[in-house]
Image: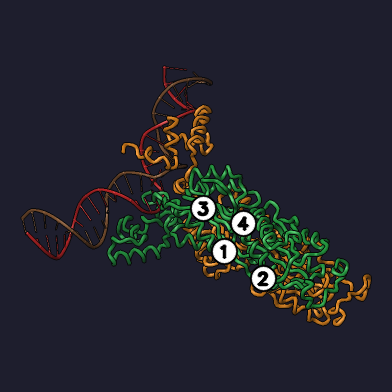
Chain colours: A orange, B green, C red, D brown
Amino acid sequence: MAEPTRSTPRRRPTLADVAAHVGVSTTLVSLVMRDVPGASPVNRERIRRAAEELGYHPDSRAQLLRRSRSRLIGVVFRVQDPFDGDLVGGLYGAAGDADYELALSAVAPGRDERRAVASLLQDRCEALILLAPHSPTSFLAELAGRMPIVVVARSVRHRALDVVRTDNAAGLHLAVDHLVALGHSRTVHIDGGRAPGAAERRRGYHEAVRRHGLTDSSHVLPGGPTEDDGAAAARAFLDLHPRPTAVTVFNDRCATGVLDVLSKAGVSVPGQVSVVGFDDSRLARLSHVDLTTVAQNIGQMSHLAVTRAKDRLDGTDVGERELVVSPHLVVRSTTAPPTTTPSRPTATTASSPEAASLG
Amino acid sequence: MAEPTRSTPRRRPTLADVAAHVGVSTTLVSLVMRDVPGASPVNRERIRRAAEELGYHPDSRAQLLRRSRSRLIGVVFRVQDPFDGDLVGGLYGAAGDADYELALSAVAPGRDERRAVASLLQDRCEALILLAPHSPTSFLAELAGRMPIVVVARSVRHRALDVVRTDNAAGLHLAVDHLVALGHSRTVHIDGGRAPGAAERRRGYHEAVRRHGLTDSSHVLPGGPTEDDGAAAARAFLDLHPRPTAVTVFNDRCATGVLDVLSKAGVSVPGQVSVVGFDDSRLARLSHVDLTTVAQNIGQMSHLAVTRAKDRLDGTDVGERELVVSPHLVVRSTTAPPTTTPSRPTATTASSPEAASLG
DNA sequence: GGGGCCGCCTATAACGTTATAGGAACGGTA
DNA sequence: TACCGTTCCTATAACGTTATAGGCGGCCCC
């Protein structure tokens, strides 16, 4: 039992192992592994080779423990949400640029936000980025007393919380302006219910139609964030009389449900009805969906979230608590001029039974 | 500079802070926080209160560094994949039951599997669970020399690797048996290309139709894992003559693309064509899709993956390297008896132009 | 030749926790 | 009184790393 090290060959090699192998101090090995100056080229090379040979990997726990700063940013995300997935991808890039590491903690069925946050607290993250959190503001505020908190894609008004979000109202302005420019006047907005951002998008819709003097020929239909919500809303839409020629939808998932029901009902898109989504998710980009939609700038949002966390940690003086990112419109193939507009009856009117009975 | 502790009030409290606050040793606080015997009820209560009051959270880095075992299992997953998302949810549950923690590392655009794995190695994970990895077997085998590796949802034959996967061939047997039982004889399988599991599902399809003596009236169409692949395959399907009455599809995403194109072409499902997917993903369960599909048993797969990792770590003697989980069929509304079968012409034939020109 | 600086290296002490060993006080027993 | 076993508690040394403070030559410059 002179050398327990040798009796357990499975032990992971440490700095000391590499140092002993080369015949130098652990400090020198540490210098070389961190690529900081202070070692001769000869030793640098020998140490690198020994580390490679022994399969040495630094122990991040020990590193983080020793270093005053962990340079770790925690991210809470919903593991099934495609939008969160895209954001996480962007965050990895942005964190790398800022020289921070990311610690991921998922919200999943059976694992709520409190659990996810608690695990990140234990990991000594210096700041937290929460993607579309649904925890009460009081909980978020309490967290903010402990460390910088950046909330993404949810509007929270609290002086201790940073927020990065899309200008949802502006997004609906873009959508409505686009439809009006195409010649539509009878429009409807399918709402997101209590989902984050839904109220602002609804407000944006109202503002835009009022600006165009189209308040009387506009509607809001109850909906929600999911495909099912969209499908239900589309059925209600089919009963409207006279039928609007264009629809703005809370998000792309919901819009997909709308498109599906319209297609099954024999209503052609964009022939009889134009549809605009929101998010520019993977869904919208699928060639068979090819949805005109309001794109959130995921890259910029990720960048801003990380930068804001970093600025808070650095004590940099920042201005607004809330960073609002402008969306932009991506025109694809679900929008076109209305064919039933009195002013320009270009194409033949639709011949489906529904259209006939409602026209 | 007598007490730097007091001069920086923002520092996170440590065991020592709690101990000083109560007037006991750090060891005693540690005992209480870990809920191990050896402290008097009075002190136990006082320490708990002090910890709460100071907002003390144990530093998991220091804990893991000190403890011989980290009890940490690393998980590599694709951050945008809904199936991986479901699995991660299951893994959290299973890991909790086995008294392990999970460390998540995402594969995302700009962050490949090597990066994801390297970060977990640094975190001193004791084992790795890789969800549908696409790294070469050689890389996985090299990892397996370092620690237990469990591969989920991909078939890899290597004596050092544990595999947990669905019995893909059996899944297609279920699908074909179901269709045949409904009365279908002309079927087609839309393939997954090079996606994991595609070859086995294709083989299962071939086996099943041969068993039913339907080889001559069966086809395989090239496809892929995405909605777009399904949409393209569906267009090819529409050109088949005579048109098959039922389709088995590589997965639910691909099936969604198929359904969409069929719907736009005026082909009714399940009236004219029955469709069976694979995965039972969220997609399939949406009420407006309501897809008959082969369900992978996510709960069992998660459980088996964690258990296998644990057994390897415990040195438990386990049998097979490969754990094959049986799928089951979920019948929803995209399958029905064929209406064009000579034996029972129940409904009126469809009247859409496409159907007419091809019928 | 003295002083200063630079390049290379090492010893030591942390970081916050837990494992180990052991001490003090107390009651019970011989 | 001596001895034992509990119960409750503490001191100390790790875990693997890095920050700090040097040490030791050698070279340059007055």
Classed neighbour count for the residue bearing mark 4: other residues with Cα under 10 Å, few (<14), some (14–19), many (≥20): many
What is the CA distance from the residue labelled 1 to the residue labelled 2? 18 Å
Above or below residue A205? Residue A287 is above
Where residue B191 sits in the image (x, y, percent)? 71, 56
Where residue B270 sits in the image (x, y, percent)? 74, 72
Classed neighbour count for the residue bearing mark 1: other residues with Cα under 10 Å, few (<14), some (14–19), many (≥20): some
Q: Which mark is residue B103?
A: none
Q: Earlier in the sequence, mark 1 or mark 3?
A: 3
Of the 4 image quadrants, the one containing the C terminus of chain B is bottom right
Which kind of residue does numbered mark 4 sit on? Val
Say whether residue B212 is visible: yes
Q: Secondary structure at mark 4?
A: loop
Chain letter behind tag 4 = B
Asked whether disc 1 touches disc 3, contact meaning CB atoms under 8 Å apart, the reply is no
Chain letter behind tag 1 = B
Asked whether disc 2 touches disc 3, contact meaning CB atoms under 8 Å apart, the reply is no
Q: Are marks 4 and 3 on the same chain?
A: yes
- Residue behind mark 4: B79
Which kind of residue does numbered mark 1 sit on? Asn
Which kind of residue does numbered mark 3 sit on? Gly
* A241 left or right, relative to A349: left
What is the CA distance from the residue labelled 1 to the residue labelled 3? 21 Å
> Considering depth in this image, is A220 or B95 the residue closer to the camera?
B95
Asked whether disc 1 touches disc 2, contact meaning CB atoms under 8 Å apart, the reply is no
Above or below residue B111? Residue A213 is below
- Residue behind mark 2: B286
Q: Which mark is residue B297?
A: 1
What is the CA distance from the residue labelled 4 to the residue labelled 3? 15 Å
